[in-house]
Amino acid sequence: MPQAFRTILSHAESYLGCWCLLGFRLRMTPIRTFPSNSIFQRPFSSASRDRVNTSHITMAVAVDASRFEGVPMAPPDPILGVSEAFKADTSDLKLNLGVGAYRTEELQPAVLNVVKKAEKLMLEKGENKEYLPIEGFAAFNKATADLLLGADNPVIKQGRVATLQSLSGTGSLRLAAAFIQRYFPDAKVLISSPTWGNHKNIFNDARVPWSEYRYYDPKTVGLDFEGMIADIQAAPEGSFVLLHGCAHNPTGIDPTPEQWEKLADVIEEKKHMPFFDVAYQGFASGSLDEDASSVRLFVKRGLEVFVAQSYSKNLGLYAERIGAINVICSAPEVADRVKSQLKRLARPMYSNPPIHGAKIVANVVGDPTMFGEWKEEMEQMAGRIKNVRQKLYDSLTAKDQSGKDWSFILSQIGMFSFTGLNRPQSDNMTDKWHIYMTKDGRISLAGLNLAKCEYLADAIIDSFHNVN
């Protein structure tokens, strides 16, 4: 390399070194590419080298910033971020009550025995890993529709249900959102306030407008049914009303059977489309049929209905991403058209769904012995959560001398409890007591055991009474 070039490179490095440290990439054109009259091709005399003023050197150097400079850092997920913070905490007292995942009494992740049995049978059969059709595994689709609506339901026998296996609850909701955006571009989705944190993300991502209807009453820590009805009545005709089939997330507050009837009246009167998110069938009450009663009520009344399903909770298949989108239609030919368009949307989105979880569900539901074992295990899981809920209530009532009524905890259902704590109080739960929860005051009782209930009660009482 000519001495002149080395000199200039040395000066260039001093000018541009700080840029490189800031993440810029220095790209230099090789010397052989310069034209013959380039300064880099003409040797300097010693005198000219002495007169070199580095402040006036113009370098043939390109400095490229990343093409991703305009991409900001995303905020942490409000739910999954709780687990990351929990893992970083070294306290022996820490509790993770943020993520809705079932834990044993020893606070360990659980794989259901019936799932292990189904997987063992699948392994023994030596089944292949071929692609599924776009609509998914046929045996799963039949099993999931039967489980949701009842195998003897007329809408199934008449072929009026379009079912597609999808990527658990989130994927099913997202597929339905894409369908709404394409075929009901002027429609709005009504979402409960509050709701599961990902609902709004899903519809935002699909560019589907949404608004909220009143649901939670902070004064009573119960259902604001009058506000709910008023908001649904006031919504534009033909809106999609997103409803939690059972075990409302995050509040754990469900309408009564009489209130479900009234909701159906209003939705039918306004020509709205009911859209159920069923994430906890069998996991809330312990009964598959009882937890599907709200959906079956609307279907029985002859309404067309969207239903997203998930098997993350009731079968513990969190990582298998197994669920379905069901559309109950007015006629078989309508169901065929709807299904064809759902498949058309799924193809460029994820092409086809995974097979492993679908076969587990199909095998468990399709085998009478395993189906019975599953129902027993579901009852045990639901029962453990009910016991924890009762113990927490008893602990709060015994320890809190203020006379506050904590009975709302017992009126809630499912794996979550809405404590009524605000954000500063929830922060105190984490900062002082090492109890990790979402900032809206929701706790997952599935992550709690009987031994920790009194400690949790102490934390709630302290946070509620001593933090504004």
Image (cartoon, rainbow, N blue to C red):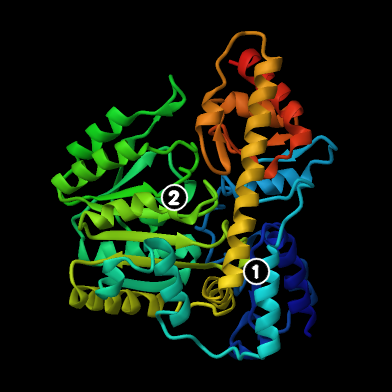
Quadrant into which the N terminus falls: bottom right
Q: Give the foreground label among 1 and 2.
A: 2
Residue 241 picture location, percent across and down:
28, 48
Residue 280 picture location, percent across and down:
50, 53
- The residue under label 1 is 25
198 w.r.t. 436: above or below: below
- The residue under label 2 is 290
Disc 2 on helix, strand or loop?
helix
Report whether residue 439 is seen: yes
How packed mark 2 is, by other alpha carbons closer than 10 Å (few <14, some 14-19, many 20 or more), is: some
What residue do we see at 70% from left, 65% from top?
Answer: 113
CA distance separating discs 1 and 2: 62 Å
Q: Amino acid at mark 1?
A: Arg
**Left/right of residue 382 with respect to residue 238 in the rendered view:** right
Whichever of labels 1 and 2 marks the residue nearer the N terminus, that label is: 1
- Callout 1–callout 2 Cβ contact below 8 Å: no
